[in-house]
């Protein structure tokens, strides 16, 4: 059901994160293809801008101007506030719609923002104050087939924007708004708009708020009944004081279909499609590309195509169209063979479609529904039953983001495709099976179309920049490669639905510039997230680009596809929800200026034992006149190993220590780890403005403990002396003597005399203890033994045991006794 999607509308416009970004927003929010547009990046610390990295071809940034500081009062908190002006040269054949991009400065790769390319000339809204164009009689006159750049102004009352067009009877009037999709802000904001078409008297002729095609962004298409003036009104559906609520309003005579049927076809074929939902439904032939995947289809002839596409699926296998009646298993549409794409429409309430196919035991088929993902109103549910026994083999309603191959998504992300089932079908026996599909609400209609792709499971591994934070903020996914230094990020591998990850995988970096080298360990199913380091030569030019990380099986006989993915949110809401999502198949990087410091990590010449600790020495080499503090941490440690919180090496010191601890279940082995260091300038929450470098990889050896200690239950009276005799189990030998200490003793209880020492031959250790008269009576748990020994000239500390000590009131002279 769509209720959980619409629930985002009810969440107050409160930022879920108050940290700062380099680029806060880009204006204007779009431009016409074939033109050159003046644009402005607003943000912080955008000094020395270099260029703009576009994820798609078709736009070039030219005439980049220096950073202009506009708010010096903010400088102390976040650095300089200001803007960078430049021009976007948009090619005549540039693809329409959303274009993701990042500005690159000498010091940083900025956050991803978007720019929208449209087919029509741009007209700016002329409203200077609330009320200038709020009513039909004050509507701003505009020509047909233009894109209006407007803004819902913040005020105590709802702002409305009205535009007047002149029409002839029988003409199509179409309206499409880009509001939520513009993703103007990283967080907060109110972009949910409503559009109405009014006649010259103000009578409402058409209205739209939400729709299956563009969710929150309204679309309208109608045939006007008379010659004369018509008004397009744009406003919020429900008033909420907006923040930077910009919109692009495409207004003209273009076609605006809501859905196309069938929803896809086979690669390279000429497909006859029904264009549905436009004011004038029709049939059109489209030649599909020779590459499988999503295909942007623009209905209509030249000059009448819509500003945004209807997406079709292109597959390597043929279509099977439903043949009515197929409401029962007995009348199921026959399917010649698998793989296949099943196509149909739940055309009336209560409709149920069936398809019959053959499958062999031991095969694995991925069954994916495409409906909501492609603008259909269908909220589908599928089932597969054995045609002979009617036994249920599969029953699936909604999907998770992972099941829809969105690996970089948070568990709170919500996209329409989650209403489309996706499952793995593994027949229990060979034979015929019947697949049924229905709407979960019992609804139906001409735009309740579906496409079900059934294909053999293929192993496909997706790489992504792993998150180290709860929310997926862009800072933690940036790749800034500092000249002459190293940069380390955690990379995660995820298999698509049905993929079996086995053996070892190695990474390939496609698109790295010369002079930047990737150092990556091998991944396994037990270690799917690992640190990957990029080493940068000193003379590498400041540059930027897009790269792809591909994971390949070390065993070359194993077939596996691979690619990268990065998911981003815009207009984040409280609780991790967002208005808009963007998934990219490339990872942006920038080579940045040489940092003012470097670091070296040194591990002691000993391993980290389970239930033990060790300290990593981190040495800072400051350069030039840099005298600031440096924060150190690790972003990745093996399972069962943790670190203390971030440690700051003050400006007066050149060395700090970072303590690592292993629990009793830490994974034994040798692991490459890196220490991360950053300056403390800029915004401390997001680290925007900070300079980040990495140490070289060092090898951390995690091993089983030397011994284990069993601490018995014991008791002691106030004011008395006693003994605690602990049993020792030797696990691996050590040389010399080890010093033992009891930790977490209750207040008023101390070990008397020198701490006891043991060798690798001892089976017991005895502690002389004393309880002061003021010791608190009670039962104290989690007392443990800390053992310190020397290996290779280094102190090794481990913890063991979990004892209980009871302190009793004084009743006479009585020694402590093991209980």
Image: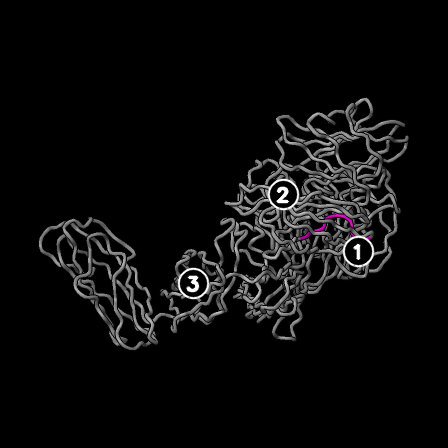
Q: Please report contact status of discs 1 and 2: CB closer than 8 Å, yes or no.
A: no
Q: Which is more foreground, mark 1 or mark 3?
A: 3
Q: Is residue 100 magenta?
A: yes
Picture quadrant where residue 476 is located: bottom right
Residue 614 image position (x, y, % from top left): 37, 66
326 left or right of 606? right
Report which quarter residue 184 is drawn in.
top right
Q: Residue furthest left?
A: 812
Depicted 515 relative to depicted 452: above or below:
below
Q: Nearer the viewer, mark 2 or mark 3?
A: 2
Mark 2 to mark 3 CA distance (whole Å): 38 Å
Which circle marks residue 334 in the picture? Answer: 1
Q: Residues within 10 Å of mark 1 (few under 14, many from 20)?
A: some
Query: Which mark's residue is nearer the viewer, 1 or 2?
Result: 2
- For the N terminus, the image quarter is top right
Answer with mark 2 or mark 3, whichever residue precedes in sequence.
Answer: 2
* Residue topped by disc 3: 641
Tell me where residue 626 appears, x and y as whole percent.
48, 59
* 350 over 286 or under it: above or below: above
The residue located at (56%, 53%) in the rendering is: 475
Which region is colored magenta? 93-101
How many neighbours does mark 2 have within 10 angstroms: few (below 14), some (14-19), or many (20 or more)?
Answer: many
Name the image quarter holding the C terminus: bottom left
Q: How is the image coloured?
A: one colour
Q: Which mark is residue 185?
A: 2
Of residues 201 and 629, the one nearer the viewer is: 629
> Which element is circle 2 on?
loop
First in residue order: circle 1 vs circle 2:
2
């Amino acid at each position: 059901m769509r209720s959980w999607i619409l629930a985002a509308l009810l969440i107050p416009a409160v930022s879920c994160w108050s940290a700062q970004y380099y680029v806060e927003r880009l204006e204007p929010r779009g431009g016409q293809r074939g033109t050159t547009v003046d644009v402005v990046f607003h943000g912080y610390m955008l000094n020395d801008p270099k260029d703009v990295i576009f994820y798609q071809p078709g736009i070039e940034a030219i005439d980049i101007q220096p950073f202009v500081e506009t708010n010096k009062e903010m400088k102390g908190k976040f650095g300089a506030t200001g803007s960078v002006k430049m021009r976007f040269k948009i090619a005549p054949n540039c693809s329409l719609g959303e274009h993701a991009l990042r500005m690159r400065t000498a010091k940083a790769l900025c956050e991803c923002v978007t720019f929208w390319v449209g087919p029509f000339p741009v007209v700016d809204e002329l409203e200077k104050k609330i009320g200038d164009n709020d009513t039909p009689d004050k509507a701003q006159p505009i020509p047909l087939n233009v894109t209006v750049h407007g803004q819902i102004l913040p005020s105590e009352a709802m702002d409305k924007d009205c535009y007047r067009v002149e029409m002839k009877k029988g003409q199509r009037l179409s309206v499409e708004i880009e509001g939520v999709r513009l993703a103007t802000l990283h967080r907060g904001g109110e972009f949910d708009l409503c559009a109405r078409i009014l006649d010259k008297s103000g009578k409402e002729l058409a209205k739209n708020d939400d729709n299956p095609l563009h969710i929150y962004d309204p679309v309208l298409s109608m045939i006007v009944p008379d010659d004369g003036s018509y008004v397009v009104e744009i406003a919020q559906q429900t008033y909420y004081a907006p923040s930077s609520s910009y919109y692009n309003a495409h207004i003209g005579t273009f076609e605006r279909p809501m859905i196309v049927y069938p929803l896809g076809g086979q690669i390279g074929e000429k497909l006859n499609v029904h264009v549905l939902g436009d004011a004038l439904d029709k049939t059109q032939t489209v030649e599909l590309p020779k590459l499988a995947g999503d295909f942007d289809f623009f209905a209509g002839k030249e000059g009448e195509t819509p500003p945004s596409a209807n997406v079709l699926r292109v597959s390597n296998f043929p279509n099977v169209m439903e043949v009515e009646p197929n409401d029962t298993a007995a009348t199921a549409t026959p399917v010649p063979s698998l793989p296949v794409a099943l196509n149909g429409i739940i055309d009336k309430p209560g409709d149920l479609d069936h398809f019959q196919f053959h499958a062999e035991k031991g095969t694995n088929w991925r069954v994916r529904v495409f409906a909501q993902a492609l603008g259909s109103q269908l909220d589908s549910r599928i089932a597969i039953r054995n045609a002979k026994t009617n036994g249920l083999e599969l029953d699936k309603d909604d999907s998770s983001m992972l099941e829809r191959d969105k690996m970089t998504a948070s568990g709170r992300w919500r996209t329409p495709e989650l209403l489309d089932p996706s499952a793995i079908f593994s027949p229990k026996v060979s034979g015929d099976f019947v697949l049924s599909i229905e709407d979960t609400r019992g609804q139906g209609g001409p735009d309740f179309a579906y496409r079900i792709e059934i294909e053999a499971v293929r192993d496909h591994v997706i790489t992504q920049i792993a998150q180290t934070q709860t929310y997926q903020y862009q800072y933690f996914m940036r790749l800034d490669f500092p000249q002459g230094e190293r940069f380390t990020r955690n990379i995660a591998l995820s298999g698509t639905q049905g993929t079996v990850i086995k053996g070892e995988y190695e990474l390939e970096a496609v698109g790295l510039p010369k002079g930047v080298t990737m150092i990556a360990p091998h991944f396994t199913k037990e270690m799917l997230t690992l640190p990957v380091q990029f080493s940068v030569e000193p003379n590498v030019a400041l540059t930027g680009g897009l790269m792809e990380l591909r994971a390949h099986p070390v065993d070359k006989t194993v077939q596996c596809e691979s690619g990268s993915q990065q998911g981003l949110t815009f207009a984040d809401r409280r609780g991790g929800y967002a208005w808009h999502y963007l998934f990219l198949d490339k990872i942006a990087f920038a080579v940045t200026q040489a940092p003012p410091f470097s670091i070296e990590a040194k591990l002691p010449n000993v391993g980290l034992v389970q239930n033990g600790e060790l300290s990593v020495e981190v040495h800072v080499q400051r350069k030039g006149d840099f005298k600031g503090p440096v924060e150190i941490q690790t972003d990745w440690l093996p399972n069962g190993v943790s670190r203390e919180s971030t440690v700051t090496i003050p400006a007066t010191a050149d060395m700090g220590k970072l303590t690592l601890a292993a629990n009793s279940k830490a994974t034994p082995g040798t692991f490459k780890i890196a220490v991360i260091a950053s300056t403390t300038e800029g915004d401390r929450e997001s680290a925007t403005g900070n300079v980040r470098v990495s140490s070289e990889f060092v090898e951390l050896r995690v091993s089983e403990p030397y011994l284990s200690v069993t601490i018995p239950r014991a008791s002691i009276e106030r004011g008395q002396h006693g003994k605690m005799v602990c049993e020792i189990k030797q696990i691996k030998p050590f040389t010399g003597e080890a010093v033992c200490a009891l930790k977490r003793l209750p207040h008023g209880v101390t070990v008397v005399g020198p701490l006891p020492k043991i060798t690798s031959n001892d089976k017991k250790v005895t502690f002389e203890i004393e309880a002061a008269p003021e010791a608190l009576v009670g039962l104290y748990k989690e007392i443990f033994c800390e053992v310190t020994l020397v290996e290779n000239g280094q102190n090794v500390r481990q913890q063991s045991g979990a004892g209980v000590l009871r302190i009793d009131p004084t009743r006479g002279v009585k020694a402590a006794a093991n209980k």
